[in-house]
Image (tube, rainbow, N blue to C red):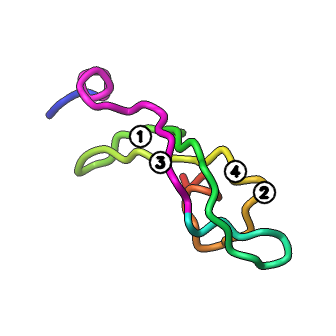
Amino acid sequence: MTSIEELRQNLPLTPGVEKCENFLTESGIEETVTVVIVPLHFKEKENGFMVSWSCNQGDECHNTNCVYARGWV
């Protein structure tokens, strides 16, 4: 099995700039915004690895279904 360090060196776990079409304002209006998605947590699991990601607009986004806005762990 590959170690976490080997995986980190070989996977492109870098921030990415993306278009988000599901950004939800406080008043419930859906907008398209530019976001930066970054790797937040990296965990070794029994059957592999898990990477969770977060969005730089997460504090402002009210889309409760978005795992990036919530910083899913």
Pointer 1 or 4: first along the chain: 1
Q: Are marks 3 and 1 in contact (CB under 8 Å)?
A: yes
When the figure is inspected, residue 42 is found, relative to residue 23, above or below; the finding is above
Pointer 1 or 2: first along the chain: 1
Q: Are marks 1 and 4 in contact (CB under 8 Å)?
A: no
Query: Tag 1: residue type?
Result: Lys
Query: Tag 3: residue type?
Result: Ser
Whole-Å distance between the Cαs marked 3 and 1?
A: 9 Å
Query: Tag 4: residue type?
Result: Gln
| Magenta segment | 4-20
- The residue indicated by pointer 4 is 57
Residue beneath the point at 77% across and 53% down: 59
- The residue indicated by pointer 1 is 43
Specify whether residue 42 is painted magenta: no
Q: Are marks 2 and 4 in contact (CB under 8 Å)?
A: yes
Pointer 3 or 2: first along the chain: 3
When the figure is inspected, residue 14 is found, relative to residue 25, above or below; the finding is above
